[in-house]
Image (cartoon, grey):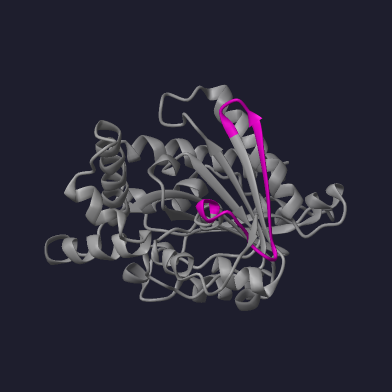
Amino acid sequence: MEIFNKDNSDIEESFNIHTDLAVENREKFAGQNVEIPGVKLEEEDVYSDVRLTKVQIVTDEGASIMGKPKGNYITIEVYNMNEGYPPQGMKNVAEILAEELRRMLPVKNPQDIEKLSVLVVGLGNRDVTPDALGPYVISNLEVNRHIYMLQKKPVTGKGVSAMIPGVMAQSGMESAEMVKGIVKQIKPDVVIAIDALAARNTRRLNRTIQIADTGIHPGSGIGNHRMGLNQETLGVPVIAIGIPTVIDAATIVSDTIDAMIKAFESASKQEKGSLTNVFSEFTPAQKIQLIRELLEPQLGTMFVTPKDIDENIKCMAETVACGINAVFAV
């Protein structure tokens, strides 16, 4: 296995494909047969239909190559989530989420979790279904900070509070600005930010949960950068939980072309068609750029979501909320 070479332009160019998932950033190098310095990868099939992938970025060099901050990125991928996944399966996913979340919390001993003050932030726009994950999770969350505050006797726990800051078009303010004000007021020990993400691969839409201890930059996956929610901006540890609900239309077209080329090659191994010859000379990044330029006049930068997004977003929101409740609910 070769060591990553910064002079490899094909790898560098591939970073212009939109994705919020660290596991997909890591997968961009799989075909190059390279080992990325400062990046560790662990994969495990927890169940026959659930895969747990852990990407740990431990050095500045690894962060630069991956395009993400140093930290831990955990991906829970459910293969058949969109095929009538049974309640027990969702319960299993929630339990995995709860277990990984416990490990990321800023406590030395598991019994200290109940002493934490936690602020859960539901990012996104409730009126736009693919972006409504955060608000939907908050709707299913068991908040209890107010109960602790009403206790006359001292209690060990500090409780869970929640907020839905909305989006800039609704409030005229950055979500991070509002969260920062709330953090300053209630002084939580940790912030958990929930947001919808963008994926590179359609098979991960609405069936993948990413947990990261590096915070979150709302809208970064679709090129709409906003002020980040992380320890640097808020002053407290921030854990991000996200689910990809949209994908760049250009990547779908690119994948379709790749599949078509493979079909042509299989049908005629001796003589390739002219289309195959043309596209075989393009790097993945060049192919994506060409497709975007072709789509731009009519479609612009389009992101798409599955047709059953309404059902999927509610199901996934309930699963995420169930996992969080399992960690903090009394």
Residue placed most toward the observer, 281 or 249: 281
Give percent across and percent down for residue 305: 31, 46
Instruction: Pick whichever, 86 or 221, lies toward us.
Output: 221
- The correct choice, above or below, for 252 with respect to 70 in the image is above
Residue 42, magenta (yes or no): yes
Q: Residue at x 68, y 65 (%)?
A: 37
Horizontal relation, residue 283 to residue 80: left or right: left
Q: As displayed, is residue 126 above or below residue 177?
A: above
Q: Nearer the viewer, residue 140 or 10?
A: 10
Q: Magenta segment: does it hold 25?
A: no
* Residue 6: x %, y % from top left: 56, 73
- Residue at image location 52% in from the left, 74% down from the top: 7
- Depth check, front residue: 318 or 276: 276
The percent position of residue 323, horizontal first and vertical second, equals: 63, 40
Rendered view: 224 above or below 83? below
Left or right of 175 in this view: 255 = left
Tell me where residue 73 sits by quadrant.
Answer: bottom right
Q: Is residue 229 visible?
A: yes
Residue 326, placed above or below residue 184: above
The magenta region covers: 30-50
Q: Is residue 279 left or right of residue 234?
A: left
Looking at the picture, how far across and down is residue 159, in whole percent?
71, 53
